[in-house]
Each structure stands twice: as C-alpha cells, then as structure tokens.
Image (tube, rainbow, N blue to C red):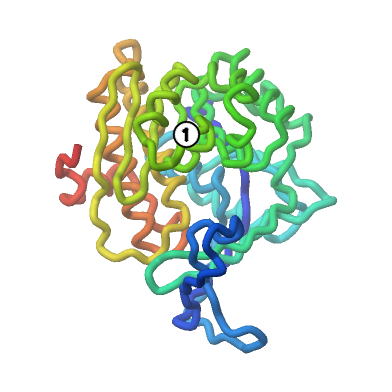
Amino acid sequence: MKDILVVGSATYDIFLSSPLFKATSDPHFKDNPAFPTGTAECFAFGGKISVDSLHAESGGGATNAAVTFARHGLTTSCLAPVGSDLFATLIETELKKEGITTVFDRQPKFPTGYSTILLSKDGERTILTYRGAGDSFSNSLLNNKNFSASWLYLVSGHLLLPTIKKIFSLAHTRKIKIAMNPSLHHLSLGPVSLAPFLKHLSVLVLNREEGSVLTGHPYADKERILSSLRSLTPALILLTDGPAGATVLSGQTSFSAKPFKEKELLDRTGAGDAFGSGFVASLITAEKKLKKKFSLFDEKIQREALRFALANSTSVVEHIGAKPGILTYAQFTRQKRFKKNII
C-alpha cells in the first residue's frame, strides 16, 4: 500500500521567456471577463519574437503534487489520463526518476495535454493550454488495485462529475483519507452540487478566489468566505491568499501566516500545487510518525504543515517550471530562512 495516490492531470509544458513579452493595461480590458485582472500580456502581431530561454518539463496538478509527496519521502503513485504519444512517455520517465509509480490511462484518440507558458520578466505568466486526454478516465482504471493507498490527493481539473463520484466511492469504500484541490470549473457548480463530495473530505485546499466562487461571497469579504466554508465541510481547510499568505480553518479555530520572502521571483507556475501538496505531505509524515497519537486537528501539526507549505511554494517560484524548486524534507530543514517562525 502506498502512502498516497495522486489523481488528476498530467501535461507536458514548454516555458518561454522574452523581454518582448509586455504586460499592458487598456480601458477596453476593464470589466471584460476575458481579462479578469485588467491586464494583458502582449507582443507584436505578425512578428517573429526572439525568445531568451526555453525550459521543458512535465506539468499538470497531479504530477506536480506527486513530486512534492515523493521528495517528502512518501511512497507515491500517480493516476492520470494521457495520450499514446511521446509526451506521455517523457512525463512517465520524469516521474519514475522521482520514485513515483505511474498508472497512466493512455488514450489513443487524444494527445497528451500540453501547455505553452509565456513568462514575463517579473515572474507572471500567460498559459496556453490544450487539455487533450486530460478530461476523462477509462472506468477500467478506477478499481481497487489502483486505489491502494492511505491518502488520496485529488486535483479535479475538468474531470467529469461521474468520474469524481467513482473516485470518491472507491476511496470511501477503502477508508482512504481524501484531500482535494478543486478547480474553478467544479466550484462554479455551487455548494449544493458539491455537497456529496465536501462532506467526505479530510482536507480541502482552496485559494481565496476559489473560496469566493464556492461560497458566493464577494472576493473582498474574506471573513464571510471563511465563515461559510466552515459550514460546508467538516474538513481541515487551507485557504491561500497570494502575498497575504494563508489561513488554516480547523473546526471553530483558525490561524494565519505570512509567506516567506523569495530570493528572486522567476515563475509563479506550480506555486499553488506546491503549497497544497506540501501541506498535506507534512500531515501524512506526522501521521506516520505519531500513528495512533496523530490528530488532523492538532494545531501544532497544522502549523508545521503550513510552514512547510509556505517554504515549498516559495522555493518553487524561485525557479522556472513547477518542479525544479520542490523541496525535499532535508532541504527544508537545512535552510535557515525556513526555520523562522512566521505564524
């Protein structure tokens, strides 16, 4: 039995950076849903753009999270839909080098998911994504053999609801603890549609925007978002909030922490994956160490988990790509900057 099974997307990512990628604002962007931040990344139309650097690696929420768990010393398997192509082989090879057991749903009708990430000089990025095979699983892979783990980490992406229902049913039957990082695609369905899933979670990982969408409260009203989340699930809740850090909701108690300062911000890709999976990895490690004395709602355990999550995401944004900066537990303990109590 593995410590954790990670289920979700696997993609192949190409990172391109150039000083000719410019961030620009325009009155036409205001209140335009296609430009939610009011800013666009622009470059010359019809021109040939010189690129300073190119970086290629596996991506997708499931593979990114799986590497965090593996580098934390946990036995890890990754279940993801891919195509029958070279990209799938490259992704599988990368994960096996990390000691991760791969269970890939190779679909001959669709190519593996693919992304091109355009990086600006300040670390912000625009992601061009082709989902390909990443939206569905063959039911034959959703079975007891593949769901042999103590924990499940689900990155829901655009998976079909019947697929998610099958995943939860398998986990519930086998008494597997479920941690979930749901996508906006699913959160927009609302709490009533998601209630059957929310009630079975051990850990729920959201960012503030996602919390706003799920609860229906304005993004600016953080306290109402937090209050409503408590009523929607019995899970331990981790709500991230960008530069403001993160908040842990544990029953009727909560605490927050500021992020660590990065040495250099190169690329935000994968920071959310590193944060959520880092938090859960630390919880699982504590459970293995403490065994029957472990409690998911032990604040000391939660605070240490949050410290590692913050460190892991900080390290990731200091590198190009979602995986190069993911910390091993030894790297985390050796770096003095991550020993400071920021909570």
Image coordinates for residue 222, horizontal then vertical, percent: 37, 36
Q: Tell me which corner region of the image, top left, top right, bottom left or bottom right, holds residue 205.
A: top left
Dot 1 alpha-carbon crowd within 10 angstroms: few under 14, some 14 to 19, many 20 or more: some
Q: Is residue 17 left or right of residue 131?
A: left
Residue 341 falls left or right of residue 316? left
Q: Quadrant of the C terminus?
A: top left
Q: Which residue lies at the image location 34% right of the left edge and 31% below the top edge?
A: 223
Q: Amino acid at mark 1?
A: His
Residue located 62% across and 45% down the image: 9
- Residue at the outermost top position: 292
For residue 61, side relative to residue 248 (left or right): right
Q: Which residue is mark 1?
A: 217
Residue occupying the point 74% across, 37% down: 137
Q: Position of residue 335 (x, y in %)?
A: 20, 51
Is disc 1 placed on a helix, strand or loop? loop
Residue that protrudes farthest toward the right in the picture: 109
**Image position, residue 184 (x, y; %):** 57, 41
Q: Picture coordinates of residue 164 (x, y %)?
A: 67, 29
> Quadrant of the rendered structure where residue 165 is?
top right
Above-or-below relation of 341 to 22: above
Q: What quarter of the picture does the N terminus occupy?
A: top right
Q: Is residue 56 above or below residue 70?
A: below
- Please name the residue shown 24% across and 50% down the image: 260
Q: Between 12 and 203, which is closer to the camera in this rendering?
A: 203
